[in-house]
Image: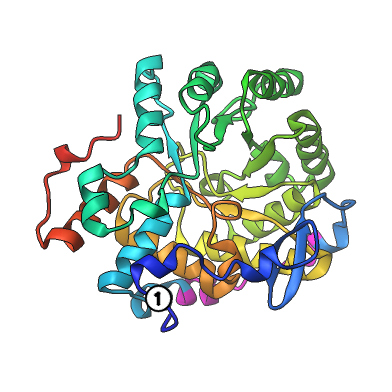
Amino acid sequence: MSDDKPIRDRKEIDTRNIEGAAGGTIAVLRGQPLLSNKGIPLNLDWVRDVRVNTSAVERRAQSHVARRTVKKEWQAAWLLRAITCMDLTTLSGDDTDERVRRLCAKARQPLQQELVRKLGIEDLHIKVGAVCVYHTFVETAAAALEGSGIPVAAVSTGFPAGLSPLAERVAEIRRSVEAGANEIDVVITRAHVFGGRWQALYDEIATFKRACGHAHMKVILGTGDLLTLRNVARASVVAMMAGADFIKTSTGKEPTNATLPVSLVMVRAIRDYAQETGMAVGFKPAGGIRTAKQSLDWLALMKEELGDSWLRAEMFRFGASGLLGDIERQLDHFATGRYSADYRHPLA
């Protein structure tokens, strides 16, 4: 990562090739322009041929953490990029309209103005990638974010278990889109994966995709429940074939959520799919990513495995609720040389 630039020069991270490519191109992988994912017919041979060397994946993840780091102004620049790729999230049983409005205010201005001035980044207009809420709060979030350009993401389809009747899950998607959601995070039926029922999984996700209409669909695999990395890889491939705009690790409610080995398997599935089809799919790790250091690990993973095209909110998101506070503290330390107290960086 020796090609990193100082903080003010990182606001555009090699997006020129994307913007200058053929119309409809959303990413570039190894010089190949990629289109948004429209899905392909289910290819069972492809799914059955998926193999994962678990020990090799775990060694790669361990070495990645050990040998990748950025310091000083370059670290600050990467942390700013992490903020722009963040789905600021509240998915608690005690959520209220007022809490959602406060979260949306934080999404519009994730860093305190005093800190923005100290960093000299007023012209970057830093904001988060999206705000993620339950369906009940979609209208509240849409009103609070009006004019900001920040999308509203709604968790849907019987989140987090995904076990309600299919018709109810599809209806929930449609209601959220009608209420103003720009993105829908759907939950798959994990039992389809356990049973190897790939056609059923494909049909379910394709049905969700049709219900989403113009809204982007993020497919939550619930990787902590899938037991093996091979299951994760196969579910990733099927979700992309069915038209997923993003594949997402977790609901944040499983005992084990986003991990680097799981993420490595998923991003390599994205890479293989892009090379085979010419279509790009985004990636969202969610749950358990709470520190600024962790966010740098995931950004470096995306850069190394997929390239700079995926270091944008259009292609990469963190599902996070507590991450922003630690990033803000680290940036405050960069600007002042001192760590500030947690209470000075509330989310909502």
**Identity of the residue drawn at 35% across and 35% down:** 106
- The amino acid type, in three-letter code, at marker 1 is Lys
Element marked by disc 1: loop
**Identity of the residue drawn at 35% across and 39% down:** 109
Q: Main secondary structure of the magenta part?
A: helix
* Horizontal relation, residue 18 to residue 347: left or right: right
Q: Which of the 4 quarters of the picture holds residue 110? A: top left
Of 342 and 125, which appears nearest the observer? 125
Start-end of magenta stretch: 47-60
Vertical relation: 80 (above or below) 196: below
Q: Is residue 265 magenta?
A: no
> Residue 211 in the image: x percent, y percent?
77, 28
> Residue 58 in the image: x percent, y percent?
48, 71
**Identity of the residue drawn at 55% across and 49% down:** 249
Dot 1: few (<14), some (14–19), or many (≥20) neighbours within 10 Å?
some
Vertical relation: 180 (above or below) 279: above
Of 298 and 288, which appears nearest the observer? 298
The quadrant of the picture occupied by the N terminus is bottom left
| Furthest-right residue in this view | 41
The quadrant of the picture occupied by the C terminus is top left
Count of number-bearing discs: 1
* Horizontal relation, residue 176 to residue 207: left or right: left
* Horizontal relation, residue 82 to residue 218: left or right: left
> Residue 136 in the image: x percent, y percent?
53, 16
Q: Is residue 55 magenta?
A: yes
Query: Which color scheme does this rendered protein use?
Result: rainbow
**Identity of the residue drawn at 41% across and 48% down:** 125
Name the residue carrying label 1.
Answer: 5
Vertical relation: 260 (above or below) 184: below
Vertical relation: 36 (above or below) 174: below
